[in-house]
Image (cartoon, rainbow, N blue to C red):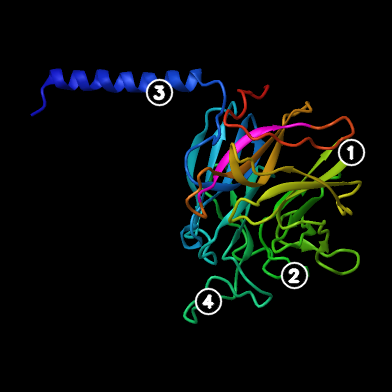
Amino acid sequence: MISISKCKVAIVVLAAVVSTFAVAQTSKKTSGNPIFDGWYADPEAVILGKEYWIFPTFSAKYKDQVFLDAFSSKDLVNWEKHPRIIDTTAVKWAKMAMWAPCIVPKDNKYFLFFAANDIQSSERKGFGANNPDKDDKIGGIGIGVASRPEGPYKDYLGKPLINQFYNKAQPIDQAVFKDKDGQYYIIYGGWGRCNIAKLKDDFTGLVPLENGEMVKEITPKGYVEGPIMFIRNGKYYLMWSEGGWTNGTYKVAYGVADSVWGPFEKKSTILVADEKVATGAGHHSVINIPKTDDWYIVYHRRPIPNKDRDHRVVCIDHMYFNEDGTIKDVKMTFEGVEKRKLKK
């Protein structure tokens, strides 16, 4: 039997621990890098309502990548984890390698685009390519849908949106971009090829282009994977990752064009390894604070020393522009960024 006095002591101790944690959270002035615990990569960072959200890949062996987590913050410093917002039990055709999510709020719903199964050819050989007992005919880019950012998400289409190798681009690493006229585009592609396509208004498929093709290739020099697109001062910026994701050569480059269709001529590489901080920095996204020219880059990198292929962490740093619109080199830090609440 536990005495009442011992229970009181336990309650006091617990209250002290909670109070200490609350004080630590409140007094934390910068995000620090990494910004949250765990092995994660390919972060999609967005503003949803009055909160910052990050949707990353769970960085592990392909067979263990069967779910996605999300993280939210009111100030860029303190992050709340939302575990397993979607997993392979909700997406029957997905068996493994769920990665590189992107989120689109539309019509009071949230559409979560993701890749799954790591298909390897136009014949769509994926997770079962070396095992005849497994179905290897399906994989690519799928969509989940939910009524809240944190889910739970269910399979929207019951099949991949894209599971073909158009222009030899592996159907992975999708970004969804809304142009000034309201048209949504999907920009995607691995294996050194980048495609862009128009999305139907309800996201149930692609809209054929004027020439009858489903997609257009816009691959810039040096491109490997991980594209994102945004507009600043009327110019279209395409950013992507170069090098190898499994090692320290990973890095971020960008190009600029006057149209969503390009052509995107490479300007420079702006995020590279820093042997004093981390290596393998890449597959990023950006946040622009509304009604300002303040930008943040959210990316993954490899801690030093790095002991495993999948040991990647999510970080955030400032991203600045020169007067001519070019992007300055990003300085990786351990401090991260200061608190920044969104205005109501």
Nearer the N terminus, badge 4 or badge 3? 3
Mark 3 vs mark 2, CA separation in Å: 51 Å
Circles 2 and 1 in contact, beta carbons < 8 Å: no
Nearer the N terminus, badge 2 or badge 1? 2
Secondary structure of the residue carrying tag 2 is helix
Nearer the N terminus, badge 2 or badge 4? 4
Secondary structure of the residue carrying tag 1 is loop
Tell me if I can see residue 104 in this picture: no
Tell me if I can see residue 52 in this picture: yes
Query: Mark 3 — residue?
Result: 21
* Quadrant containing the C terminus in the rendered view: top right
Q: Main secondary structure of the magenta part?
A: strand
Question: Which dot, 2 or 4, sits closer to the camera?
Answer: 2
- The percent coordinates of residue 221 (x first, y second) are 82, 57
* Residue type at numbered disc 3: Phe
* Quadrant containing the N terminus in the rendered view: top left
Secondary structure of the residue carrying tag 3 is helix
Query: Mark 4 — residue?
Result: 135
Q: Residues within 10 Å of mark 2 (few under 14, many from 20)?
A: some
Circles 3 and 2 in contact, beta carbons < 8 Å: no
Mark 4 vs mark 3, CA separation in Å: 48 Å
- The residue stretch that appears in magenta: 311-320
Q: Is 98 located above or below residue 36 in the figure?
A: below
Nearer the N terminus, badge 1 or badge 4? 4
Mark 2 vs mark 4, CA separation in Å: 22 Å
Q: Which residue shows up at 64% across the image and 29% down it?
A: 50
Query: Mark 2 — residue?
Result: 168
